[in-house]
Image: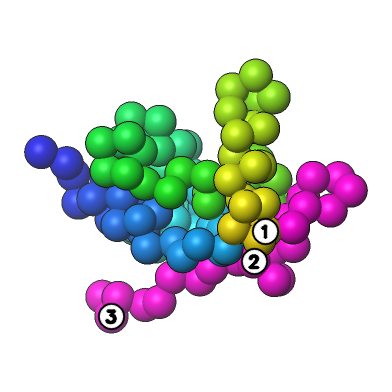
Amino acid sequence: MKSVFTRKIIDGIAAIPAGKICTYGIIAARAGNPSGARQVARVLHSCSGKYRLPWHRVVNREGKISLSKNAGYVRQKILLEGEGVVFDECDRIDLDKYLWWPESSGD
């Protein structure tokens, strides 16, 4: 059984639309723990396949892919580019243009 926090992380990631990205920190904050970005990474690692999460749409607060070149970086970039997300010359994503802000759940 998943904790409420974990369930909120899963739901938040699942809601990110194609062509948009969100940060680990924003997802953590919306799930109830503003300092829980590492927990978001843990959930992505352990639950992406099971829940068919769009893991590739989660990036760091600088708009960069956090995975190393040997651990999925290229795949994540290809998937994002396939959705129309553009990277600059430093491999950053323009957060003003592509950042998805989850709507308030009213709680």
87 displayed left or right of 22: right
Q: Outermost residue, left direction? A: 1
* Residue matched to label 2: 98
Q: Position of residue 2 (x, y in %)?
A: 17, 41
Distance, label 1 to label 2, CA atoms, is: 7 Å
Residue sitting at x 23%, y 50%? 7
Q: Are marks 1 and 2 in contact (CB under 8 Å)?
A: yes
Q: Indicate how the structure is coloured in the image.
A: rainbow
Judged from the image, the secondary structure of the residue bearing numbered disc 3 is loop
Magenta span contains residue 99: yes
Binning the other alpha carbons within 10 Å of mark 1 as few (below 14), some (14 to 19) or many (20 upward) gives some
Q: Residue at x 53, y 51 (%)?
A: 57
Label 2 vs label 3: CA separation? Answer: 24 Å
Give the crowd class for mark 2: few <14, some 14-19, many >=20 residues within 10 Å.
some
The amino acid marked with disc number 1 is Val
* Residue 61 is at least partly visible in this image: no
Task: Give the mark nearer the N terminus: 2 vs 3.
Answer: 2
**Residue 100 in the image: x percent, y percent?**
54, 68
- Going by the picture, which residue comes out furthest to the right? 89
Residue sticking out furthest to the top: 70
Instruction: State the predominant SS element of the stretch in magenta.
Output: loop
Instruction: Specify the amino acid type for callout 2.
Output: Tyr
Question: Residue 70 placed where, x, y %?
Answer: 65, 19
Q: Residue at x 86, y 45 (%)?
A: 90
Per the rendered image, the range of residues in magenta is: 86-107
Q: Which residue is mark 3?
A: 106
**Nearest the camera: 89 or 2?**
89
Residue depth check, mark 1 versus mark 2: number of the one nearer the observer = 1
